[in-house]
Amino acid sequence: MPKSEATTPQDAAALSEAILRKLTYDLGKSRAGARDRDWFMATALAVRDRMVDRWLTQLRASYETGKKQVYYLSLEFLIGRLLRDCISNLGLNQEVAAALASLGVDFEQVRQAEPDAALGNGGLGRLAACFMESMASLGIPAFGYGIRYEHGLFRQLVREGWQREYPEDWLTFGNPWEYARPEIAHDIGFGGSVEAVAVSELRVRHVWHPAETVQAVAYDTPVVGWRGRHVNTLRLWSARAIDPLKLEAFNFGDHVGALADRMRQESICKVLYPSDETPAGQELRLRQEYFFASAALQDLVRRHLRVYGDLRSLPEKVAIQLNDTHPAIAIAELMRICVDQHDIAWDEAWEITRGCISYTNHTLLPEALESWPVPLMERLLPRHMQIIYLINAHHLDSVRHAHPEDGRLLSSVSLIEEGHGRRVRMGHLAFIGSHKVNGVSALHSELLKQTVFADFHALSPGRIVNKTNGITFRRWLHQANPGLTGLLTEALGPEVLDRPSLLPGLVPQAEDAGFRGRFAAVKRANKEALASVIRHQLDLRVDPGALFDVQIKRIHEYKRQLLNILETVALYDAIRAQPMKDWVPRVKIFAGKAAASYHRAKLIIKLAHDVARVVNSDPTLRGALKLAFLPNYNVSLAELIVPAADLSEQISTAGMEASGTGNMKLALNGALTIGTLDGANVEILEHVGAENIHIFGLTTEQVAAHRAAGTRGEAAVAASPRLGEVLEALESGVFSPDEPDRYRGLVASLRGDDYFLVSADFDHYWEAQRAVDARWRDPAAWQRAAVLNTAHMGWFSSDRTIAEYAEDIWRVPVAHTA
Ligand code: 26V
């Protein structure tokens, strides 16, 4: 039974006392003067106390019992708020609610006073956060390592339809979840030179003399798993300039210069890089990558040596997961630590390194694959560059040995890309430095084998494995959708909270009109809550009885928000042409950020607003169509929208979305998917069944054929009068009378190379949307499909994903089964 069900009044009283003590003695505030923010801090500090004993005990126990540790290295952790998560996993829901009520404080207001920790861009960062929660829930001893950015992802404001970026300040009022560890600090070197010291006639030892050194200081956040059984650590590093006094003495007489130096060094952890910005050529980004990878390795090596005394046992006791190539420099760093600092022979060091490390790839997009200019690497990390050359030499020797005289193969698998300036290919380095490489959905993993890593796959068959992404049900079902969770526990028993494998027990209930009614009532209540936010934020009234059609994700051309907007315009035209027809009322809901420098994506946001202005104010539609773009999409906004969605838009160009995880959140919460055969949609189709999902569009192979044939968008436009009209309206400035040419460029691409196949897929998408309408007209059929989506999504729990990583990649036992 969940602990919260056994709450006693004493528990609540003890907690309210603890909260008051925190408010008074830690924050120095009186009850009368306390604001929501203060109550949040006091509550969080009191809740944090409940984790600490378990945390410290388990940490010690995991060393004493010699358990293998997992280290998850990620430049992004997109956490969101933690209060509800901690309370719910500790089973304190009722205690906290009662404690705050007894203090006359509204829990929901307190909860909303917490800022989102937005230390990530999107899917990759959110996945890392779900994984941390699942590792704790499964009782796998693990550390997450990342950077404690002072400013997370920018805040998005929309002014006259244009996105504007504002700095995000999540730390302004303090972070109650973290413990600063000023005594845990590692020196991180940059630049300088490498000295070769002869230690014997046969051996030289390389000594790196960095030109500058920055300290990485640890900040620890406990991560509590489901039912509070296990607590892991998220250790984020902050940069501290070394000994500011010495620095000032060094710059004697130049006080300002000394401080400027210090500022420059500490700038490493000031701000999160937007992932969609081309990373190449950005020195600060490479500094960030080495800074946290080196801190992580020094930290875990020190811990390992303290317990075991020898690095040779590292692969037996340590698994290091690289979340994308961002921490891939860790491979060269671990080689340096082994060879230069611990005198381990090269071949043995390589065995140790490959034994520990594995790598997850999250995208096939060529522009997203990291590579660094050789001159930059030589200047910033001279010893690592030497090591990379040596790794490459050994690697190419073995390739040459197996495939003599295959020049094409050699240059394709070389770590160094020759051509317009030599560059280090981080994906290649990550591949050869890892014992396992994984993709994030079945389709994506297959495409890895066929495209970016085809040659590597032929050289090392079996190294690429698939680990389809998942989401933590605690956050994305239990916490975000308490109404549905209540219904599920009523129908399937409270065990369903621990075992999503029980969800198929809903299948017979889908035939029960009474159950469907209760399911629909929960959805309706969630939609009313969202409608109220839309009204307050956008001054727009939407009917909670309408179909809520949702596309929430980063704005990117391959995700094809544009396709959705074009369909909106086509529907608008159709309704205006026949206003008296029985249209299915729809609310198109969008949310998402565009990278600051991604002009096309920002123009798509502007288009959504231009279309919204026209559509939302047209009385002839009689409410049949509305468009709402909610600003500043983040984890908290997702938690509000996901439970309220009827239709989930997963419409990327096939082959381009590695997995998607929003698709899983929405389907789990009973939204039907309209989507292409891309990423994890393919597996969602397999699980929910073809009759409960709306699939449309070109397949990956057809996309490739289309592009190879050079088919232009014009052909699709000529074949589709409907699309033709939409494009003409955009071109003639119907939606942008203040600037009639605004969308000419956009439309020209749709008529031209149509790289993302928006035009090519348009008619198919339109038809699929009309099939959605038809289903909506039959409420029983819609509700049945919605229930069956929830019933069949259990497999997409990140507990399942993590259990697979644990077994196939990390080789660690799972203490608590999902
Ligand atoms: C990076 C870049 C950089 C250059 C410009 C274009 C571009 C586009 C996307 C990205 C993001 C790459 C990494 C990433 O976030 N991948 C996402 O990872 C999720 C978790 O595995 C997965 O669900 C998403 O499908 C995938 O896009």
Image: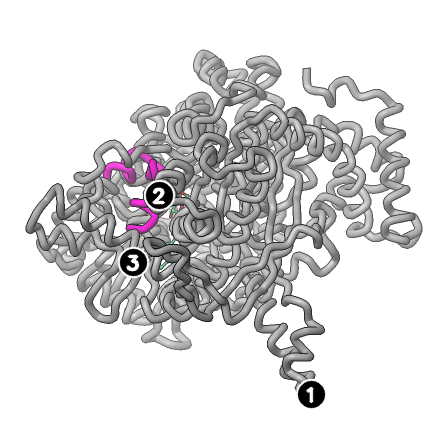
- Give the mark, 3 or 2, whose residue is nearer the N terminus: 2
The amino acid on which the numbered mark 1 sits, given as a three-letter code, is Gly
In this rendering, the answer to whether 698 lies above or below 55 is: below
State which tag comes first along the sequence, 1 or 2.
1
| Residue position for label 3 | 389
Categorize mark 2 by other alpha carbons within 10 Å: few (<14), some (14-19), many (20+).
Answer: some
* Marked residue nearer the N-terminal end (3 or 1): 1
Q: Is residue 566 visible?
A: no
Q: Is residue 660 visible?
A: yes
Seen at 49% across and 15% down, the residue is 502
Q: Seen in the image, is 808 located left or right of residue 798?
A: left
Mark 1–mark 2 contact, CB under 8 Å? no
Stretch in magenta: 428-446
Q: Residue at x 68, y 78 (%)?
A: 248
Where is residue 758 shown, x and y percent of the image?
A: 25, 53
- Mark 1: few/some/many CA within 10 Å (<14, 14-19, 20+): few
Q: Residue at x 69, y 88 (%)?
A: 253
Q: Residue lying at the far left in this picture: please name it.
A: 405
Q: Check the image and name the residue furthest to the front.
A: 201
Q: Which residue is mark 2?
A: 350
Amino acid carrying label 2: it is: Trp
Mark 1 highlights which residue?
A: 253
CB-based contact (under 8 Å), mark 3 and mark 2: no
Residue 269, quarter of the rendered image: bottom right
Distance CA(mark 3)–CA(mark 2): 14 Å
Please indicate whether residue 275 sits to the left or right of residue 718 in the image: right
- Can residue 443 be found in the magenta stretch? yes
- Residue 687: give x, y in percent of width and height: 35, 24
- Residue drawn at 90 percent across, 42 percent down: 21
In front of the other: 728 or 260: 260
